[in-house]
Image (cartoon, rainbow, N blue to C red):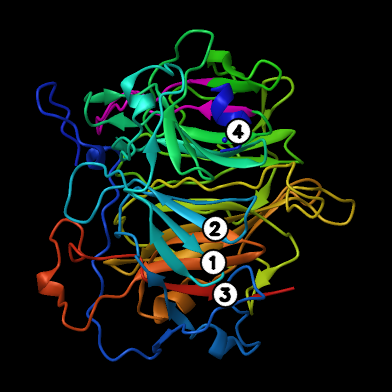
Amino acid sequence: MDDILERGDMICIDSSPVAKATSRCAVARMRTSRVSRAEKAYEVQKTIHVRKHHAGPLTPSSSEKNAWAIVQRMEGSCPPYNDHGRFIHDPYNNNKVYMVGGDRPGESEASPDLYCCDLGTMKWKNMTDSLTFRNPYQPFCEEEAKRSTRRIPCLGRFGCAFIRLHDISFIFIFGGFDEDQNEASSRTVVINLKCNEWFYLQLQGGSVIGRIRPAVVAINTKVFIFGGYTRFDETDPGPHNSYSVAEYFPGEHVWRWVVQDAVYSNLIPRNHAFDQAIPVYNGTRILLTPGRFADRKHIQFSEHNLFFFHVAQNRFQTVDVTGDFPRDVLWYTCFPNDSRIVPLSATPKPPERKARGRPRKEKTHVSASTPPTLSSNSSLSTSSTSAPCITICGWVPWGKEEAAPELWNLFLTPTERIDCLNISKKVYDLDHDFQDAIMTGGKMMLLGYDPPEDVKMEDADQEDGVDANAVWNIYIEVPFSK
């Protein structure tokens, strides 16, 4: 381990005990069936220039109509249109976003996919078969002596985070459903992004329980792992009411479990599920957002299911916030944000809520929260003039058959409110299939798939509602104004 770091080279659920539970079956997200495509009002524009002076796409026109019309194509080896894959931004390199794992269209088991996108050019690179497997704990074994490329394990619904050691970025992957072992995993996989290597991390202090879809976040040299599920079961997935903490000790060059499966305090309701963990207040607390107990239920945000976790004291606390909470959410992701930016013409005060349609699907996602040690202008830093803000991008039912993304800004102390930004109609009117989002440098991009002209809806995969060769190939930058 020391050698690797020091050289810088760094639930449809089948609950039958007999049938193999595939990763797609857990808390299933059903892929939306796209509406029939008439002539689009907005043309997909192909980006042909290299953006040398921007960390992401060029800022759209100040005209709201034009800004919302710029749907652009991504280039290179675009990743498969996977369900349950992890889009994770490297906070130490604003130009890099990675897609890890997920279930490919038409397939029921998790994939070992690894793709990287350069946000300067919006060009993807396939890294799936580019990683070398390491066994640093047995330096004389054949695997280490004769190193070769090997794909990362096929894990369904794992948790992951970025860690930074010795100026090297690593992807820390914990848990998930191990397709080979047919059980919840308690192993840790680490990907060294500088050396393009991966290995199984050995942590001192004993073992911890396996967790499917835990909420994972890294702060400095610690990785916090909350909740997750025991098994695939639509009625009782066995949510874990406990958390673990792993810590790296630089002087000894070892990782240890410093907290092992500690039971939640009485403040957390029994069988409560967390979906995401986000560092706030310069990393002194973690914001924990709600998940779901059963797969067919929508996620309902409220003041009763948002919690802080105090990092220094390992203590839970309720979050005091009011406003227009996200309701009937099918799936969502969260990002730290600058509290002063809102989408163009967004209404800062929440409108009267309207009844929404039936659910269509659910997605798990891990967001790469910016670590508190990044820089002085990190969005996690607090000041006396602005409140820490988390932007929630969630998909809500639209009409009878469709879903559309919506945004909310969650302001913490001293503002303590949540506002809906009302962008869902604008995105829906684009008539494109956007199903994920990334955020970097104060810019948010919705990612999606636009099929070739010769692909018809009747040719699409029946389970997913998209063709088996679908890829993430389009994006739109949500136009923000200060």
Q: Nearer the viewer, residue 478 or 128?
A: 128
Reading the image, the residue beneath label 1 is 119
User: Mark 1 and 4 residues: CB-CB less than 8 Å, in contact?
Assistant: no
Q: Quadrant of the C terminus?
A: bottom right
Q: Secondary structure at mark 4?
A: loop
Q: Earlier in the sequence, mark 3 or mark 2?
A: 3
Asked whether the viewer can see residue 166, the reply is yes
Q: Secondary structure at mark 1?
A: loop
Magenta-highlighted residues: 222-243
Reading the image, the residue beneath label 2 is 96
User: Mark 1 and 3 residues: CB-CB less than 8 Å, in contact?
Assistant: yes
User: Mark 1 and 2 residues: CB-CB less than 8 Å, in contact?
Assistant: yes
Give the quarter of the image for residue 338.
bottom right
Q: Give the residue type at disc 2.
A: Lys
Q: Give the residue type at disc 1.
A: Leu
Task: Residue 230: say if magenta.
Answer: yes
Q: Nearer the viewer, mark 1 or mark 4?
A: 4
Q: Earlier in the sequence, mark 1 or mark 2?
A: 2
Reading the image, the residue beneath label 3 is 57
Label 3, label 4: how many angstroms apart (C-alpha)? Answer: 34 Å
Q: Is residue 300 above or below residue 37?
A: above
Q: Position of residue 82 (x, y in %)?
A: 30, 54
**Which label sits on residue 7?**
4
Q: Earlier in the sequence, mark 2 or mark 4?
A: 4
